[in-house]
Each structure stands twice: as structure tokens, then as C-alpha cells.
Amino acid sequence: MVQAYRMHIGGEWVGGDGYFNDLNPATGQVMARFPAGSAGDVDRAVDAAEGALKSWSETPPPKRGRILQRTADILRKEKERLGTLVATEMGKVMPEALGDVQEAIDVFEYFAGEGRRLFGNTTTSELKGKFAMTVRRPVGVMGLITPWNFPIAIPAWKLSAALVCGNTAVFKPSSDTPLCAYELVRILLRAGVPDGVVNLVTGSAADVGEAIVRHRRVGGISFTGSKATGEWITKNAGLKKVGLELGGKNPVIVMDDADLGLAVEGIIWGAFGTTGQRCTAASRVIAHRAIRKKLVAELVRRAERLRLGPGVAKTTDVGPLINMAAVEKTEGYVDIGRKEGAKLVCGGKRPPGRGFFYRPTIFDDADRGMRIAREEIFGPVLSVLECGGLDDAIDIANSVEYGLSSSIYTRDVNSALRAISGIEAGITYVNASTIGAEVHLPFGGVKATGHTREAGITGIDEFSHLKTVYIDYSGKLQKAQIDAGE
Ligand code: NAP
């Protein structure tokens, strides 16, 4: 018997008029059922969030921080159970699933500390007897819309920063991973988040997501997902504060002086970890012509050895894709790559059996004009392109519309620094793969990836406004620019 779960609105667990299935991607079987929420549910959730806003935003930030710390403590105690849930519902392998939970622990701890900072600035005034500073104010009711690929960590990034800043939230998780979201919300409630502060509304993009984006009393949207959805939100959110963390087509440059063994390790991890379903996944290798053949041969040897299986199995290196649509999308791109004339050197097919699996796939001889080398596939497909030198490599790296993560393998400090300044991306790694963000550093991209910077100290900017305050203690009318003189 499959359990039917509930949404959380205004402190109550509520059902829906209809329900949708939550599938285990390794088997295709239904593992849970969730309410198919409606625009009416969103409206009730916004009412509840608005009702809770005054009290929550007036709660001293260190007290809000303590609730976040308790959330981190519970997550830590339940890490194994939650990791197993992530591996089952989303499909990533256990070490990565535990990493997903660890990232949530880290970010709740990080933003718990922010409760005792939330710094503004003090500065000078051009007039005598006048004091000037900035203070942080919450945005209000925030709509948080998340994808499935980090089903605990991404909601945790948003909820931790939103809550410490004094916002209340209407949270719509991906319809592929509602159970992870449900468990996270339960933990927040156990940690002491008051009724109405976090409202969980499950359901489709059309019925729930769009209603949140368009809602007149939602003050801000924090969205992580595809470029297409990000563009839709930009057009439909009106004048809300909008944060967008979108896709990537992340390059790894391998120079002729690189430690090839290290580069191979990093590329395999970056391209096929999480089955290529990371926004920061290494999806392009830009290899110096002097080492390309050797590099590709070693990548193929390593990729062919990767074992597919359920995320929860100890022997699995690569888990399933999230759903059948993702398998078909990957398959479609492999066909495109073949037709475009790239050379398929590894994978390129589904394994037999049930579940949403696809073999790690490598195309050699790809070209910057090809769709497989420009568009986000979000599956285990790596394209290798050849470059003649560093300028050429940077040029190829920058030839796509995205700009999230990037990497260079080289032993030459000058090449590393030229890549850091030349690559158009929010993140550049040197002698490490394109994945592996740490929560105390800003995370985000440029160009079509969006320009948001979550996590780290800049995460606070996404979930608060800076209010500028002038205090005139001169006892007389003073006019800026007019009385200040030259
Ligand atoms: P998606 O299709 O854009 O969906 C993301 C979330 O938005 C889901 O909750 C989805 O609901 C909802 N949604 C879809 N259309 C909507 C609309 N018109 N209005 C409001 N909500 C809407 O993306 P995805 O396939 O889940 O995630 C993969 C994408 O996320 C990739 O492009 C990846 O690169 C990107 N990503 C980016 C980052 C980053 O930090 N830059 C991190 C992780 C992932 P349903 O699930 O109900 O459809």
C-alpha cells in the first residue's frame, strides 16, 4: 500500500483534491503519493505566510538562528535515514546522497551564525550631526521553487537564508522529489519553526508553481531550475525580487602540461557523478591537441568500468536518471550528436532492465557549433573538443550561452590565472573538477545561468533588502548636496 502524504499550510497538514505519484527512478515503481495542490492552496499558503510575517520578522535574529541550528542538529542525527531517502527518491549514489544531507547541515549551521551578524554598514555623512547606515529587512513572503537534483540541499540553501533574514515562505518542491521536501519541512517544524512560517505546497508547475510566481502578495521568488522556466518567471513575476539559478554547460580545459591522471579522475567525477544531473556537471572537455587522444582513451577506459545500479546499492557508481523524460532527452541528444558528426566512443545506449538508466557516454571530435557541445543535456553525456592553445580553449569555453562553473588542469600558474580572468563563469576551479561547491562561498553564474549568488555571505542579499537609514541629530533642517558645499 503506497502512503499518501500531505501538504503543510498554516500549521496544518492538508490533503488535496487529487494526488500524483512519486516514483523511485531505479525501479519506476510508485513510492509515495502527494497532493496535487491548486492555486487555491497557494492562496491559503500565502495568507498563512503573510499572517506569520510580522511575528517572525520581529523575532530576534539570534533566536531565528537557534532554530536553524536545531534544524542542523536534527539533520545530523538523521543523516543516514535522509541519505537513504535521497538515494531512493532521487537516485544518486549513497556517498553523494549523504553529501546532499551534509550540505544541508552545513548551510543551516552557516546561516544560523548569520543570526548574530546580518551586517549592514555604517558610513560617514556629508553633513555635520548626521549619522548614516544600512540595515537588513526581510523581503516578505518568499516563493521558493526548487528542482529535484539536490532534493534536500537546494531547499536547505533557500530556507536557511530566507528564514534567518526574517521572511516567511511558500515552498514548492519538484514533483519528482516531494518526499525529501516533506521530510525537511517536518524537521524544521520539530526544530521550532512557528506555524505559517514555512508552508509546503506540492503539485504541478502549472497549478502551483505559476500561481506562486504570479501571486500579488508574494514579495520575492527564489528559483533554481532550467533556463526555460527561469525565462518564464522573468516574464511573469511582475516587480517581485527574483533570484534565478539556472543551467550550465561547464567546460574542463586540459592543457598539455596537466597532470593527466588527476584530470581524468576529475572529469569522470564531474561528468558522471549524479549521472551528469548537476547544474555544475562537467559536460565539455576542451583538450589540448597534444594530449587529446591519450586523454580520451583513458576517459573511455574509466567510463566503461562504471557500474550502473540503484543509488542505495553499495556496488553502484552511477545511479538512474530522474525519470523517463530525462532518459528520452539524453537519447535524443545522443542521436543529435551522431547526426552532427561527433564520434561516439563510449556508451550511447540504455542498459536492459527496468528503471531510468543510461550508460555513461562520451563523444570525441565534437565541435563548438554542435548542439551536444552547446546545450544542457543534464544526463551522463560528455563531449570532447580539441583546442590548439589556451586562448583557443578560453574562446571555446566562452562560446556557449551559459556561464556557471568551469575548470582548468595545468601546472602553469600563468595559464591558471589567465583562465581565471578569461573564462566567463561564476565559478572557476584550478586542478579540480567543475563540481564541489562549499556553502560559505557564493554560488551562481553569469550569462544565461542567471546572476544570483546564493550561499556564502551574498546569500543574505538574495533574501533581504538593504534599507538605508539617515539619523539627523543636528536639530536643524540640513539639505544634502545643497548645504554640504564643495
Ligand atoms: P525545471 O523544469 O525548471 O523545474 C524546477 C522547478 O520549477 C520544479 O519545482 C518545477 O515544478 C518548477 N516549475 C517548472 N515550470 C514552472 C513555472 N512555469 N512556474 C513555476 N514553477 C515551475 O527544472 P528541473 O528539470 O527540475 O531541474 C533541472 C534544471 O535545474 C537544470 O537546468 C539544472 O541546470 C538546473 N539547476 C540549476 C542549479 C543552479 O544552482 N544553477 C542547481 C540545480 C539545478 P515541477 O517539478 O512540478 O515540474
Image (spheres, rainbow, N blue to C red):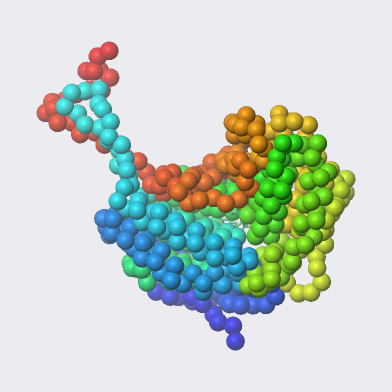
Residue 68 appears at what percent x and percent y?
Answer: 37, 61
Nearest to the observer: residue 50 or residue 90: 90
Nearest to the observer: residue 10 or residue 366: 366
The relative height of residue 288 versus residue 233 in the rendered view (above or below) is above
Residue 271 appears at what percent x and percent y?
Answer: 69, 53
Count of marks overlaid on the render: 0
Left or right of 207, for residue 69? left
Which of the 4 quarters of the picture holds residue 305? bottom right
The relative height of residue 310 versus residue 340 in the rendered view (above or below) is below
Residue 313 appears at what percent x and percent y?
Answer: 66, 73
Residue furthest to the top: 486
Which of the 4 quarters of the picture holds residue 64? bottom left
Left or right of 62, for residue 440? right
Q: Quadrant of the C terminus?
A: top left
Which of the 4 quarters of the picture holds residue 458? top left
Q: Residue at x 28, y 19 (%)?
A: 481
Q: Residue at x 16, y 27 (%)?
A: 129
Left or right of 209, for residue 400? right
Q: Residue at x 31, y 37 (%)?
A: 121
Residue 341 appears at what percent x and percent y?
Answer: 88, 45
Q: Is residue 161 visible?
A: yes
Q: Residue at x 80, y 41 (%)?
A: 292
Residue furthest to the left: 475
**Ligand 1 quadrant in view:** bottom right
Q: Is residue 402 visible?
A: no
Q: Quadrant of the N terminus?
A: bottom right
Left or right of 169, for residue 121? left
